[in-house]
Image (cartoon, grey):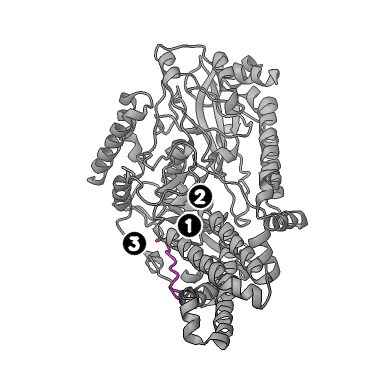
Amino acid sequence: MATEFHNLQELRHSASLANKVFLQRDYSDGTTCRFQTKFPSELESRIERPLFEDTVKRLNTYYAEAEKMGGQSYLEGCLACATAYLIFLCMETRYEKVLKKIGRYIQEQNEKIYAPRGLLITDPIERGMRVIEISIYEDRGSSGSCSGSSSTSGSSAR
Amino acid sequence: MLHLRVAEPMRECEYSQISTRSSTPMETPYKKRTPKRRKWQAFPGRNKFYCNGRIMMARQTGVFYLTLVLILVTSGLFFAFDCPFLSMQITPAIPVIGGVLFVFVLGTLFRTSFSDPGVLPRATPDEAADLERQIDVANGSSSGYRPPPRTREVVINGQTVKLKYCFTCKIFRPPRASHCSLCDNCVERFDHHCPWVGNCVGKRNYRFFYMFILSLSFLTIFIFAFVITHVILRSHRYGFLNTLKDSPASVLEVVVCFFSVWSIVGLSGFHTYLISSNQTTNEDIKGSWSSKRGKGNYNPYSYGNIFTNCCAALCGPLPPSLIDRRGFVQLDTPQSIPPTNGITMYGSTQSQSHMAAATPLLQSEPVILTDEAFLPGRTSLGGPCSGALPLGGHPTPPTSTPNLSCDNDMLPLRNEQSDGLRHHHTDGGHHHFLTPEEAPSPPGMLPCGSPLGHSHTIQGFYNPASQDSLHEDSVRGLVKLSSV
């Protein structure tokens, strides 16, 4: 835990928010939760494309897992109905469990991959599952341009 | 607090020491007098919250109390007057089954009425600005007074679906979502606004609504049948007039049940059909997927067979509430370097979640609270729930009028969806209030927050006492814009 704050803390002190990129939802599969995997142009100089796409694809799989309708979810639904939904006072739904897993995954990704590059991913649940918000940080000393100076901010954060 | 958290709210004080590096003179007093506000108190929709945010209902709850009274009185009379005779003459299982049904009906009713139907939280200013920029790029220079309607097309399962832009919530509505004008919220998988349960019926409470009307049908038929049985049996023994004298409540029960049966049973049948074909009331009434619209028109959300559709609607995973009403409002700081679009001069209200996700960390600078002209104005009944719902006497939210005026400004025209406007689907007395789809509005309505940004900065920090003055400014700002 100490490492995580160290990185993010350093990020906070040495960098300031320059821009935010939003990854919108992909509704081509219906109402299930999926995010577009299109690589935003603002991140081109910041992060390698495979890393980014991997993160988004992984998030999409987690959300698909949460909303999957299979035997387990039906069982949970019937059990909940039978107990008049009181069972959720003691245990959490599968969806909530997966959301927690997603939260941990995002935090881990931020620590390992995104913070060193001056980026930060916001958990979509905090944005009503509408977008994945990626904040781009600039080194405080630099001018307000998006591109460039990524290496300096990255190295200072390390 | 000014500082953004990486972990739960309980550990707030721990981090304040770490994050405050550059202490501005205004910070220390701000830290002391920041009131802890929960998100439901700052909720922009027209909802009422009780029990410190645990219960969420629509504004007009009068009809809900009527429903409750009808159910309680009829069942109460049944248990008091008819059950003793029936349990002795026929079987004591009758009051038991009646009791179980009664409890189930109330449970599902409360669950439907009090839970979040699937409200979509409104876009943060940054998101709204980003979308605006994308739309401007797509449309090019605005030609004429009114730009083309903001829609996005997406192909779902081979069917082209149009996603409409919601001017109130500043988002592109997901498929099957709709904006309820009564509650002023976008609701996922919007079915209808039901005044009888005092809430919208959407993705998260549809199954409870269905179980409510189904169990109520059974209860109504049950009571009706057994009251008739009671009257007949008693009449054989004591005569009809004596029966009416001994048990006058039975007449009332029969009358109530007789009129309810048609509407409730009819409604249950209708919703059974909707569930089996995986449609919402909204879609069915508009005929979105009916074959009359075109040869190739079909419902892209249906799973193909009735069983899967039913299972999906009733036993599928229950998504959690997206609005996090009991979380604490986290006040954000503005960006030190203005972004390229320049609209987001004020900070966005970051929402704090119970999950340990990393939120963007910003400098500790004076906070500017923005609420995009939809300032909070609900009946904040703070404190613990008294155990019973307050019956009437709620103070009217002060911002109700400005909300309406803003809406009126934004919805000057009703175009293609006018047939869905306030469609009273009377199914023997049960009214479905459908919401009109929001029509596109003239340009200049969207950045209604920008002139307010200045007034907000002058106001300074968020202060509940200055809320009214902020509200004044927002109204003035809107009035100025509408005259453009």
Circles 3 and 1 on the same subunit: yes
Is B117 contained in the magenta span?
Answer: no
Q: Nearer the viewer, residue B215 or B451?
A: B215
Which chain does the residue under circle 1 lie in?
B
Quadrant of residue A10 within the rendered picture:
top right
Q: Secondary structure at mark 3?
A: loop
Quadrant of residue B129 within the rendered picture:
top left
* Amino acid type shown at disc 2: Val
Per the picture, the main secondary structure of the magenta-coloured stretch is loop
Residue B359: x and y in percent read 57, 29
Q: Which mark is residue B200?
A: 1
Q: Which mark is residue A4?
A: none
Distance CA(mark 2)–CA(mark 3):
23 Å
* Amino acid type shown at disc 3: Arg
Q: Secondary structure at mark 2?
A: strand
Residue at figure coordinates x 40%, y 51% from the top left:
B391
The residue tagged 2 is B119
Q: Earlier in the sequence, mark 2 or mark 3?
A: 2
> Is residue A98 at least partly visible in the picture?
no
Which chain does the residue under circle 2 lie in?
B
> Badge 2: how crowded within 10 Å, few (<14), some, or many (20+)?
many
Mark 2 or 3, which is nearer the eye? 2
Circles 1 and 2, Cβ within 8 Å, touching? The answer is yes
Magenta segment boundaries in residue numbering: B426-436
* Amino acid type shown at disc 1: Cys
Residue B104: x and y in percent read 61, 61
Mark 3 or 1, which is nearer the eye? 1
> Badge 1: how crowded within 10 Å, few (<14), some, or many (20+)?
many
